[in-house]
Amino acid sequence: METETETETELARRCRNLPESLVEEIISWLPVQYLNQFKLVSKSWKSLINDPTFVSKHLHNRISDNNILSPTCLVFSSSEWFYSLNMYDDEGSSSRMSQVSRYFRLKSEEAFMNLVCHCNGIVCSVFRIDDDRYLFILSNTAIKKRRRLPEPSFLGYLDILGMGLCYDAKAKDYKLIGFAVAWSESVQGYIPKAEMYSLSTDSWREINIDIELESFMYVGREVFSEGVLYWNVWNPDNQILTFNVVDEEFDMFPVPDPLRMVESETLSLGLWNECVVLFSYQIESGAQTSIDIWMMEHYSDGVDDYFAWTNKLTIGPLRDIESPLTFWKSENLIVKRVDGGLTSYNLRTQKLKPLTDDGVAAGMRFEFFYVSSLVSVKGLNQSSSCPQEVQLSDIM
């Protein structure tokens, strides 16, 4: 019986007889674990797979809806661990939950994960060590690399309110944005602070944030679309905080009028066909939940751009459903059940399909869709002997 390594070696041997452009096209569709092995075949293959142009092409193929070679992966977190749920399109394949990131746990039992964000296979985990000490870890689990980031200067004020990791296509750089509030003796009140980390320079710099922020405001999970990060926040009513990564500007927008004063925990942002949507869900009598989906639509009058909310869809009421999580393949909405399990709701058939057993996601928070990639956690301007980069042990 052939081993996986023998199969990969045979595939590599056969590819040697093919035109180079065809080989590049074929392997650009393969999962990262195969490419990690192919790097050992020859120096030329290693050079190809590490080339930034190939890395970008491979990433584009990985996030394409046409890629059927790998499952969709949802990532959940507890205070110390990440868990993933792999979902397949094949009706005969069942979804399953697995613990995939054991190395994220720190040796100190006093540390816990405070924030996490993701972009194109890179995960930023923020661990709180004590009242004013945080540990920032940037990781790519697929290539088993991670590194510790320098600390932003706003640490030591209050809790970090929110963060977001995104890709600036114009600058071709990954950027991490964090915001907090600090006490000011001069104004006798709290003032906002924001900083942005650049992967290419491996440094933070302060970003202007001319928006009033509450000291302990609620900040929901972020989404990123067309160069803009979005957070739903309570400040002092429900609003949408945005950050344009190209212009480096924060802004605040209202939520739909009916949602201004509802509990913030019943709102969450998501993406539907690349459009930003706001989920609103209310548990009604008899453990039934109704879900409203509001879409943010952009308009222009030729001079100014503006947006408006449109209530696109109301789902339910659904029995034994706790909350919506995210869209999957545009016509399926993944929801969390009251028993901690996950279910898919098909918008076309209006039918529910259980994805997991009871309790699989109980006590855990949904974080993001994960895509494995070859993207390096080391910036372009950093030397190959970066002291903060370490090789990870096999986690699977």
Image (tube, grey):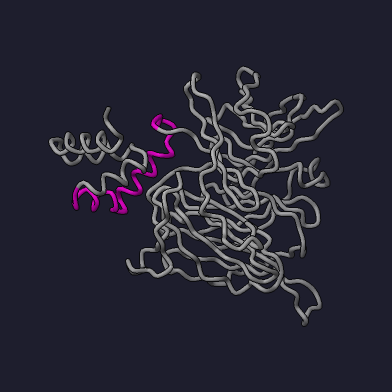
Among the 4 quarters of the image, the one containing residue 145: bottom left
Work out whether 382 lies above or below 342. below
Q: Closest to the observer: 167 or 344?
A: 344
Q: Is residue 23 left or right of residue 84?
A: left
Q: Is residue 326 left or right of residue 245?
A: right
The residue lying at 77 percent from left, 57 percent from top is: 235
Q: Residue furthest left?
A: 17
The spot of residue 368 in percent (x, y) is 57, 44
Q: Closest to the observer: 385 or 217?
A: 385
The spot of residue 305 in percent (x, y) is 60, 50
Among the 4 quarters of the image, the one containing residue 369: top right
Q: Is residue 384 left or right of residue 128?
A: left
The secondary structure that dominates the magenta segment is helix
Q: Residue furthest front?
A: 1
The residue lying at 42 percent from left, 55 percent from top is: 392
Q: Is residue 201 left or right of residue 43?
A: right
The spot of residue 352 in percent (x, y) is 65, 21
Residue 38 is covered by the magenta coloring: no
The residue lying at 80 percent from left, 57 percent from top is: 236
Q: Which residues are magenta?
A: 42-69
Q: Closest to the observer: 193 or 336?
A: 336
The spot of residue 284 in percent (x, y) is 84, 30
The residue lying at 44 percent from left, 39 percent from top is: 63
Residue 55 is covered by the magenta coloring: yes
Work out whether 87 lies above or below 232. above
Among the 4 quarters of the image, the one containing residue 12: top left
- Quadrant of the rendering where the C terminus is positioned: top left
